[in-house]
Image (cartoon, coloured by chain):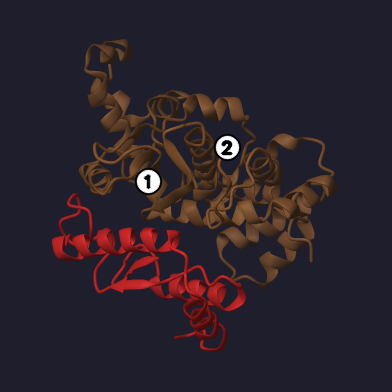
Amino acid sequence: MVLAKEDTFVKPEICSDVAKYINHNSFWKPYDVETFNEGHAFDMEEYRDTYNTRSKASAMQKTLTFIEWSQQTRSTPYSAYRWILYSFLPFK
Amino acid sequence: MNTTSPLFALINSLIAPHNQHSVVLGISSLLCFQCEFMDVACMAARNTFPEFQEATCLQRRGWEEIEQEASHPVWFPEKGTPPYPAVILNHGSSPAFSNSMKERREFFLSRGYAVMIVDSFSRIRTLKYCFNKEQPCPAYQEVDESTRNMTMNLPENNLLAEIRREMMDRVTKGYFLLPAERTADLFIAIKAIRSYKKIDQNNLHIVGYSHGGSVVLDAITMANCREQALYLMSRSKASDPSRRIIPIALQVLTFSTFNPLRPRSQH
């Protein structure tokens, strides 16, 4: 989940809290949250006010990395680490 | 408490901050005790915020109708060999083929992914949006106020672009095409992408941007709520199913138990 911290259209803190809540209560801990210090639609050149090419490239790459990562078989220690992290430290 | 009951609407209106809408919501619930919550909400919206009427007064629509409107083209990467992993891109309240969406598409294509774009502002839907009203939308009228037929002499793409600009505004403000409604487009797209032999069915991914991100979250919720939806549907007593929310959810979910987080076996 990629969020824009200075978003004027949605409240990123709510999205972040929802992700934490879901991670805390689900077995598979599905969400990773990446927050950019940008405004809404920072990756869209149509919106010049918030457009940032560097953040756009970074967000695209992180999305791709997450997609590739989701296809990999995780090692048991890593899965255990992730499970403990989000189960006992939900607001990490 | 059952959140579909008019009693819920009444209590909600009493405990909610007393604005015009909550008062009308309360009055509406008293006037129609046989109605379900969404009927009451619809009635209240008509009398207070008519601009929200399209969003509040949900209507049942068949799969065939939505499938006819649906548009979800697919692009395949130049490198690599099939079956390709695939990414389904869900646009926000801006059009599906903006420069940014094309850029996103090219990015994934260059990485060896097939890309499907779910276009919720498809040509048919755009025209329906404009002409399924008593008055055609302003973009159409602006073209030529004297004789509407003349507008067809203009390039259709220009007209569609104008209408889409209006749609964008209404979608962003929550007046039209809620994420839950767009979820149907996404499910139809998933069904379509599963028919491609060249796509790896165990390697499907959905990326939603802005309003499209809400669509993905709604899709996950609906996919996981299938059992609950079926249960509620079986308990529903309203005589006219065309104005309830549950049938829409059921329609969405009957042909797909898709859970984006769970890979499926290839078929």
- Residue bearing mark 1: B89
Residue lying furthest bottom: A88
Q: Quadrant of the C terminus of chain B?
A: top right
Query: Which of A16/B127 is in front?
Result: A16
**N-term mark: 1 or 2:** 1
Tell me which chain the residue with mark 2 is part of: B
From the top left corner, tell me how far across and down residue B71 is, in percent: 42, 30
The residue at 19%/49% (across/down) is A46
Chain B appears in which tint?
A: brown
Tell me which chain the residue with mark 1 is part of: B
From the viewer's perspective, tell me whether residue B58 is left or right of residue B185.
right
Q: Secondary structure at mark 2?
A: loop
Please tell me how crowded label 1 is: few (under 14), some (14-19), or many (20+) other residues with Cα within 10 Å: many
From the top left corner, tell me how far across and down residue A7 is, in percent: 31, 67
Residue A51 can be seen, yes or no? yes
- Residue bearing mark 2: B267
Chain A appears in which tint?
A: red
From the viewer's perspective, tell me whether residue B179 is left or right of residue B158.
right
Query: Which of B53/A24 is in front?
Result: A24
Task: Please say if B206 is above or below B144.
Answer: below
Q: Secondary structure at mark 1?
A: strand
The residue at 32%/31% (across/down) is B163
Which amino acid lies under the numbered mark 2 shown in the image of this protein?
His
